[in-house]
Image: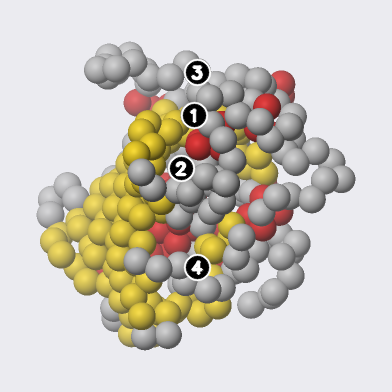
Amino acid sequence: MSENLNQHSTFSDVSAVTSIDDNRWTADIHPGWTILGNPNGGYLQATMVNAASDLVAGEHPHPVAVSTHFLRAPRPGTVELEAELLRAGRTTTQVRCRMSQGGKVTGETTVTFGSLAPAADLGQSGTWNSAGLPPAPHQVEGCATYPAAGEQPPVEIYRHVGLRPEPGQPMFTTGEGRGVGEVRAWVTLPGGEDFTPESLLLAADVLPPATMDIRPAGWVPTIELTTYVRALPAPGPVNVLLTANLILGDRVDETATVWDSTGAVVAQSHQLAGIRFA
């Protein structure tokens, strides 16, 4: 595995797993897909899903609900994965996967696999939600690249994942929050790689913490992350809105909504994280 943080590895490459036997795999956690040296939670979640998918029959090819408890952050390097089939049903299959490093469990994921349709086939007619979805995204063409050309990305993962924040978010330019607790940006993968159900798990967790729009904080480690993949995304970038709901003591919960390039909702997530303001 290359230690060059600036080398643009595709997401499918860095989240790939290698089979050892029927229910065990290894994976290499890339140092460039980290935040202050700690691997991104969505990246780790997708890697565990890739191992779990080896136990799933062809009629349930897509992760539709993924819940991960993070026990400790693995270091860049080799991790071991072990999965077990919990249930193979008519419409869904459930698998549990555990990631370990140096003999210590770092995280455990339960995945429900099913079959997803393209977002374009589902349409928006007849859609109902109790609270109302957030407004549709701005056009990507009107959003500036972050960081600006010639500037060093603030954390390692943004040397690979591209961000184009929507306008009106000073935390991306001056570092100042608005007190709203929202972060929104278009997200691209290196090499023009299109998003898949697995890489939508990354998209739902890749933005800077929404608490940065309130006031600066250090690393905001994810404790538990649940992601729902709702449809197969259209080719192109995705738009992600991340919202902080409640900060209480040293915990915060955040909700993410992910739209594809056509403006269709393709994923949602909810997470509990630790927080310590600077």
* Inter-mark Cα distance, 1 to 4: 34 Å
Label whose residue precedes the other's in the sequence (1 or 4): 4
Task: Give the mark nearest the N terminus, 3 or 1.
Answer: 3
Residue that numbered label 4 is attached to: 16
Mark 4 or 3, nearer chain start: 4
* Disc 1: which residue: 181
Relative height, residue 164 to residue 88 (above, below):
above
Quick one: label 4 or label 2, which is nearer the N terminus?
4
First-in-chain label (3 vs 2): 3
Mark-to-mark CA distance, 3 and 1: 18 Å
The label nearer to you, 4 versus 3, is 3
Q: For the residue marked with disc 4, what is the amino acid?
A: Ala
Q: Position of residue 194 (x, y in %)?
A: 57, 45
- The residue drawn where x is 72% and y is 38% is 146
**Which of the two marks, 4 or 2, is nearer to us in this view?**
2
**How many other residues sit within 10 Å of disc 2, few (<14), some (14-19) or many (≥20)?**
many
SS at badge 3: loop
**Residue under pointer 2:** 204
